[in-house]
């Protein structure tokens, strides 16, 4: 029997539209609502294994979606660090680094 792999992204944060990688930001209220709505579609789905980034926004998403399952948090799934571009919009980055 074929395995089914489902990839999910965390809900929205207060920094949606900005480059946020290493900064450990929480879900926004809208992000919590997104994940709560998504949970309804997973209620009857069999789940064998859950692997997630340890970032707060990902942990919060997993706690809402999979409250009765164990989750393995892997540093290998941690977002990259955007360095000086962290929390900036693309327009702000281009304004700061016009050669891009």
Image (cartoon, rainbow, N blue to C red):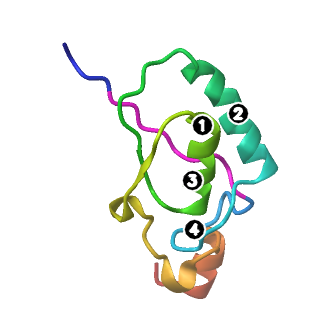
Secondary structure state at the residue bearing disc 2: helix
Tell me the SS state at disc 3: helix
Identify the disc placed on residue 67. Answer: 1
Residue beneath label 4, please? 19
The front one of 30 and 99 is 30
Dot placed on the residue nearer the N-terminal end, 3 or 2 = 2
Q: Does residue 90 lie above or below 6 as drawn?
A: below
> Sequence-wise, which precedes: disc 1 or disc 3?
3
Residue shown at the point (63%, 28%) measured from the top left: 39
Disc 2 versus disc 4: distance between alpha carbons?
24 Å
Which residue corresponds to mark 2? 36
Which dot, 2 or 4, sits closer to the camera? Answer: 2
Mark 4 to mark 3 CA distance (whole Å)? 19 Å
The disc, 4 or 3, on the residue closer to the chain's N-terminal end is: 4
Our reading of the magenta stretch's main secondary structure is loop
Q: Nearer the viewer, mark 1 or mark 3?
A: 1
Say what secondary structure mark 1 lies in.
loop
Residue 65 locus on image (x, y percent): 59, 35
In the picture, measured across the screen, residue 82 lies left or right of residue 30, that is left
For label 3, the residue is 59
């Amino acid at each position: 029997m074929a395995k089914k792999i489902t990839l999910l992204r965390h809900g929205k944060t207060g920094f949606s539209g900005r480059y946020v990688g290493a900064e450990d930001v929480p879900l926004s209220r809208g992000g919590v609502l997104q994940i709560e709505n998504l949970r309804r579609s997973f209620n009857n789905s069999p789940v064998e294994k859950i692997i997630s980034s340890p970032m707060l926004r990902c942990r919060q998403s997993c706690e809402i979606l999979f409250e009765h399952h164990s989750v393995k948090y892997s540093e290998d799934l941690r977002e990259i660090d955007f360095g000086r571009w962290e929390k900036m919009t693309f327009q702000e980055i281009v304004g700061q680094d016009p050669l891009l």
